[in-house]
Image (tube, rainbow, N blue to C red):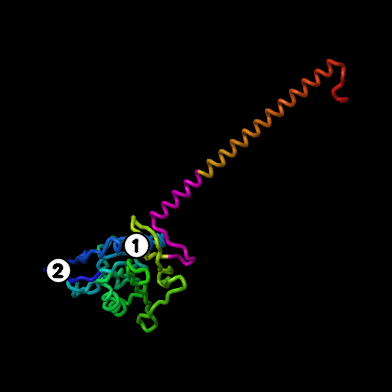
Amino acid sequence: METLSPYLELPKDELIYDDGEPLETNRHRIAMNVLIDSIYQAFLPRQDFFAGGNMCVYYSAKQRMNRDFRGPDFFVTLNVDGTLDRKAWIVWQENGRYPDIIVELMSDYTANVDKTDKKTLYEQIFKTREYYIYDPYDATSLQGWRLNGQQTYSEILVDQRGWLFSETLQLYLGTWEGKVLNESAFWLRFYDLQGNLVLLPKEEAEIEHQRANSERQRAETERQQAEMERQRADTERRRAEAEKQRADLLAEKLKELGVDPNEI
């Protein structure tokens, strides 16, 4: 998110790691974390990328204490060391690397800047491969642009599902209606190449929990079936034994009467 820095009195060798502007709403905060968590989930076990959100991106060492930084709501940079601890994305400390993909979560307040000034910055200065905007309160607001051969943005067309394909991430971006952290909305989510929703860690854990429960129930059902089969076999064995005892008793009686049981 863009801001005018109120900390210009700080020494020139210091950087601001907080852009001073909170996300617009709790839904915006959740939407940002959904994107961050799901991209890490989608890329497991890779460590050659970095994803951040509402985090300062510094791109001018000469004027780093004024407006020459931005705080994209979500961004991903590929082919970098993802294990490094970063308080901000500082381009001149990242071998000149800018984010490869940026998503801004719009609001009524930021929409105009997101569609104009930031789009121009990301296109002409950052040369960010793909730029997306989405308003978490408007399920129809998803738009995206990709750098073309002339290094200018061309709009990415939605498919029949209303999704946009990210060539950079090899994932789809699309909306998903559901509840996250007790808030129901149309969330911006990632989908894999087969169209499967990239699950959040909590969703993965819930599915694993359900799978474990199902497996326990299946095992219990099989145990009960085996016990029923054992009881059935035991009943059949006792029945057979009783039949044999009756046959033996009858044979003895016939012998006592002078009758050969084998001739009957």
Q: Which mark is residue 26?
A: none
Q: What whole-number distance in Å separates the C-alpha atoms at marks 1 and 2?
A: 28 Å
* Residue of label 1: 36
Highlighted range, magenta: 191-216
Q: Position of residue 242 (x, y in %)?
A: 71, 25
Residue type at the position of mark 1 = Ile
Element assignment for label 1: helix
Quadrant into which the C terminus falls:
top right
Q: Which residue is mark 2?
A: 6
Q: Tell me if residue 122 comes above or below residue 192 in the rendering.
A: below
Identity of the residue drawn at 35% across and 63% down: 35
- On the rendered image, what quadrant is the N terminus found in? bottom left
x 23%, y 64%: residue: 22
| Amino acid at dot 2 | Pro
Where is residue 173 drawn, in percent x and y?
40, 68
Q: Is residue 222 left or right of residue 176?
A: right
